[in-house]
Amino acid sequence: MYENKDMLSWLGYFADMMKVSPEKIKMLNICGKQKNVVPTIDTHKRVLIFADQSHEDLLYTLWEKGFGEYDMWYAEGVEPGGEIHHDKLERVLNRKITEPTVIFIMNEKTRESVRYGIANDFFSAGTVQYVGKEIRAVIMSLLDVDTHDTILALQAESIVIEAAIVASEGNIIAVEPDAGSRRSMEENVDKFGVHNVQIIPDMSEKTLAAIPVPRLAFIVANHYLESDMERLLKINPDMQFVIYTLDLGILAQTKLIFDKLGIKNMEAIQISVSKTNKDNMFVTQPSPWLISIIYMMRKPPLCNRRFSCVFKTNDSEDRSQTNDITCEVK
C-alpha cells in the first residue's frame, strides 16, 4: 500500500508543515495490520499514521479512547499533493476510512515516556485482586521488556497489558486457564488498545507449540511451577524466568526446582509497600517474593584453533606462518 519512499515523503511533508524535525514524529503503518495505535498516541506528541480500509472505524475508535480533543490533519492518497484537512478528532469521528489515508495527530501536552505502574482503577476488574502499581513497576523493571520482545505471562493480567504497551512490535502471550479471567483479559486488551496479546487457555505441549517462542516467562507461581517451567524450557532452553509468589512454601521449593533444572544465579527479593488511603491511614499491600535469574557475562571457553596468519612487513614482503594458538576472550 504505502512504500517506504511514500511514507518518507509524507514524513518530510508534515515535518516541513509543522516546522519540526522529522525524528520528532513517530510513524506507524497499520495498513492491513493490527498495531498498538492507542498506546502509541498516548506516549508520543506527534504521530503519523498510514491507514487503509481495513481500519474503517479508526477515527471513531480513537475518539472512544479519549483522543477527541487532539488536533488532527488527514489526507487521502499515497503521495503528498492532495488537500489536507485539519480538525479536532471529535468532529470527524464518524468519518470512514475507505482508501489509503494519512493521519497526523498532535498533542504537545503528551508526555513521551514509558509509564510503569498503571493505576489499578484503569483496569477492568478481573477475578483476582491485581497487584499494586508500585509492585508492578518493580516487576516490569525485572522483566526488562524490549520493543520487539516475546514474553509469556501466566495468570498476570495487569502485567500483560503493561508489557504489551512496551513491546509494541513484539508478542505477549497471556495464559489464563480461568474463563472469567480470559474475559477480563479480553476487556483489558480492548480497553488499552493493545493488539499484540495472544490469550491461551493452558500450557499444554500442544498449545505451547503453536505460539511464538518466548524469551522470558513471568509466572504467578502455584504448585505446578516445576512442570510449567519444564514445558517452557523444552521450547526455549535459554528461557528466562521471573516468579511471583506470596507463598513461603513455594518460595522454599523454588530453589530446589531451579537446582533440579540446572538454573543458576537465582535471586529472590521481597517487596513491601505501605501507602496512605483517603483517611490518611497507612494500608499495607500484600508483600510478594520475586524470584529471578541474575544473568552474568560469562567468559567464552579457551579454544585451541589452528589457523594461518599473513603479515605485511614494511618492505612489502609477505610472510605466512601456521601456529597452534590458544586464545581467550576476556
Image: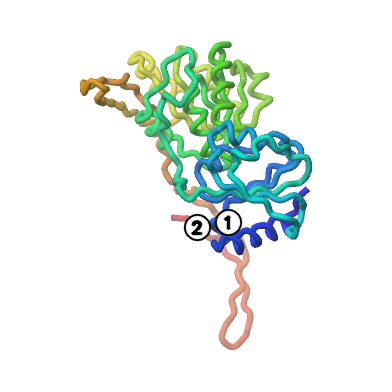
Q: Which residue is mark 2?
A: 327
Q: SS at mark 2?
A: strand
Q: Is residue 131 left or right of residue 208?
A: left
Q: For the residue marked with disc 1, what is the amino acid?
A: Arg
Q: Which residue is pictured at 62% across the width and 77% down the height? A: 319
Residue 310, how many percent across, how many down?
61, 73
Is disc 2 surrounded by few (<14), some (14 to 19) or many (20+) residues within 10 Å?
few
Determine the image quadrant of residue 173: top right
Element class at badge 1: strand
Write the residue at 31% across / 26% down.
270
Left or right, 52 with reference to 259: right
Query: Residue 221 location in percent, x, y?
Result: 44, 18
- Quadrant that contains the C terminus: bottom left
Q: What is the x, y in percent for residue 7?
A: 70, 55
Circle 1 crowding by C-alpha within 10 Å: few under 14, some 14–19, many from 20: few
Query: Looking at this view, is 235 or 107 the one in front?
Result: 107
Q: Residue visible at 51% across and 49% down? A: 45
Seen at 62% across and 66% down, the residue is: 308
Q: Which residue is mark 1?
A: 305
Q: Amino acid at mark 2?
A: Cys
Relative depth, front residue between 231 and 101: 101
- Marks 1 and 2 close (CB-CB < 8 Å): yes
Give 4 or 301, whichever is nearer the viewer.
4
